[in-house]
Image (cartoon, helix red, strand yellow):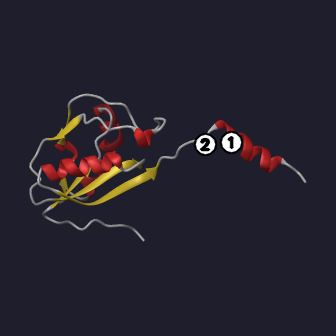
Amino acid sequence: MPITLESEDDCVIMFMPCSKNWHYKKRFSALNDFLEDYYPESSNGYNFITYTGERESLHLTKDRTKKSLEQNYYINCDLTGKKVVVVDDLFTTGGSLLDFKKQVEKKGGKVSCALFLGKTFQMPDKFNVWFTAWCNTRRD
């Protein structure tokens, strides 16, 4: 069953800020163009993010659950009374979503839902890979 977007006057679609401005553009510009073409009545928040620098990417960082997120952006508009739909490419730990939610709330908005296109995973350590392979190749 296809998913459709219902247009609401107080709803804004925003994309999760990335570690670098060029990552943001690479990840979300095509989706932004699609939304503008097929949902011209929607309020698009693609340009509501202004970058102040770069930060380390957390997707493939070891012990990423223990890392604190450096904020390298700000929301450049007033979101008072707006419902915000957050779109991101990957769900890792949820920390960046919680941080972004706080930033949206500081601007007067309310995150009503978040959509993720995938989830990152953490590679097992070498011992677990070896042990699993060894167990699966043993013949009793």
Q: Which residue lies furthest to the bottom in this view?
A: 1
Q: Mark 1 points at which residue?
A: 129
Task: Locate residue 119, reporting x and y percent.
Answer: 46, 51
As displayed, is residue 11 above or below residue 119? below
For label 2, the SS is: loop
Q: Name the residue under label 2.
A: 124
Question: Who's the residue at 32% across and 44% down the image?
Answer: 28
Task: Locate residue 82, reporting x and y percent.
Answer: 14, 59
Residue 125 located left or right of residue 78: right
Task: Locate residue 6, reporting x and y percent.
Answer: 24, 68
Question: Who's the residue at 13% across and 64% down the image?
Answer: 9
Q: In which quarter of the image is the N terminus?
A: bottom left
Label 1 Cα crowd, 10 Å radius (few <14 / some 14-19 / many 20+): few
Label 2 Cα crowd, 10 Å radius (few <14 / some 14-19 / many 20+): few
Given residues 21 and 40, the one toward you in this image is 21
Whether residue 48 is visible, yes or no, is yes
As displayed, is residue 56 above or below residue 38? above
Q: Which amino acid does label 2 sit on?
A: Pro
Asked if the residues shown at circle 2 and circle 1 are in contact, with their CB atoms under 8 angstroms apart, the answer is yes
